[in-house]
Amino acid sequence: MKSRWKPVLLGGCAAIVLDAGAWAQNAPLYDPQQLPAQRGQVQQFTLTPRGDIDGLILTDGTEVKVPRHLSAEIADSIKPGDTVIIHGLHASALP
């Protein structure tokens, strides 16, 4: 069974890695592994007025923002209760 890990960047931009193939096709200009990491359990999704997923709220209250165009992929791969590893920076004015 393949390891499925899902790093997400905080502070307005995100990269969610579903598997090695998806990563190779859409590699960002930087390596998210260089950013600080935080592990947490997904409590719920945040939604746009249209119903697209635009973020996650972790059980410790951390809010993670992700691009809306990844809404379907996030819904298919992450469920409330899943543990995720977040790679990113905390926005100074957001939780």
Image (tube, rainbow, N blue to C red):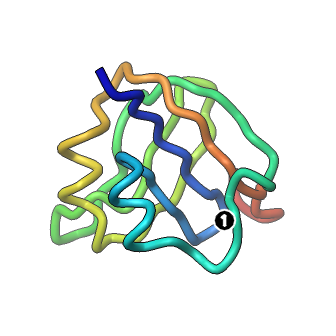
Return the x and y of residue 43 as percentages of the image width and height.
42, 28
Looking at the rendering, which quadrant does residue 4 occupy?
A: top left
Residue drawn at the location 50% of the way across and 62% of the way down: 15
Return the x and y of residue 46 as percentages of the image width and height.
36, 51
Return the x and y of residue 72 as percentages of the image width and height.
18, 58
Residue drawn at the location 55% of the way across and 51% of the way down: 8
Of residue 7 and residue 79, the one placed in the foreground of this image is 7
Q: Does residue 54 appear to the left or right of 66 in the view shown?
A: left
Residue drawn at the location 30% of the way across and 65% of the way down: 70
Of residue 32 and residue 22, the one placed in the foreground of this image is 22
Identified by mark 1, the residue type is: Gly
According to the image, label 1 marks what residue? 11
Dot 1: element: loop
Residue 37 versus residue 88 in the image, above or below? above
Residue 92 versus residue 43 in the image, above or below? below
Residue drawn at the location 43% of the way across and 65% of the way down: 24
Q: Does residue 42 appear to the left or right of 36 in the view shown?
A: left
| Crowding near the residue tagged with mark 1, few <14, some 14–19, many ≥20 C-alpha atoms within 10 Å | some
Looking at the rendering, which quadrant does residue 49 occupy?
A: bottom left
